[in-house]
Amino acid sequence: MSVNLIFRIAAVGILVSVICQVLKHSGREDQAFLTSLAGLVLVLFWIVPYIYDLFDTIKNLFAL
């Protein structure tokens, strides 16, 4: 896991937060919700391989 991934996640979080605030103040709460959901899905796609590796390592550790 590299530091680059942490910076990308932080950048997406900041960007989504700013976009959501702008959309909420302009009265578009539905689009703000969809924007935050899209940011969450994007970050999950980046994190899922690391979670899979973690569970695979734990499985191999306990030889299940």
Image (spheres, grey):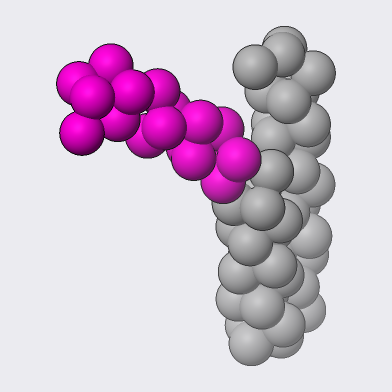
Residue 17 visible: no
Main structural element of the magenta stretch: helix, strand or loop? helix
Quadrant that contains the C terminus? top left
Q: Can you say whether 34 is above or below 10 in the image?
A: below
Q: Position of residue 36 (x, y in %)?
A: 63, 64
- Is residue 52 magenta-colored? yes
Q: Position of residue 28 (x, y in %)?
A: 71, 85
Identified at 79% across, 18% down, the residue is 4
Quadrant that contains the N terminus? top right
Q: Quadrant of residue 2?
A: top right
Horizontal side of 59 relative to 42 (left or right) equals left
Identified at 60% across, 57% down, the residue is 40
Q: Position of residue 33 (x, y in %)?
A: 60, 76
Q: Position of residue 50 (x, y in %)?
A: 56, 32
Q: Can you say whether 20 is above or below 29 in the image?
A: above
Q: Nearer the viewer, residue 21 or 58?
A: 58
Q: Nearer the viewer, residue 41 or 50?
A: 50
- Is residue 19 magenta-colored? no
What count of labels does the image hold?
0
Identified at 73% across, 25% down, the residue is 5
Q: Residue furthest top?
A: 3
Q: Residue furthest front?
A: 63
Horizontal side of 27 relative to 52 (left or right) equals right
Identified at 30% across, 30% down, the residue is 59
Q: Quadrant of residue 21?
A: bottom right
Magenta-tinted stretch? 47-64
Residue 29 visible: yes
Q: Nearer the viewer, residue 27 or 3?
A: 3
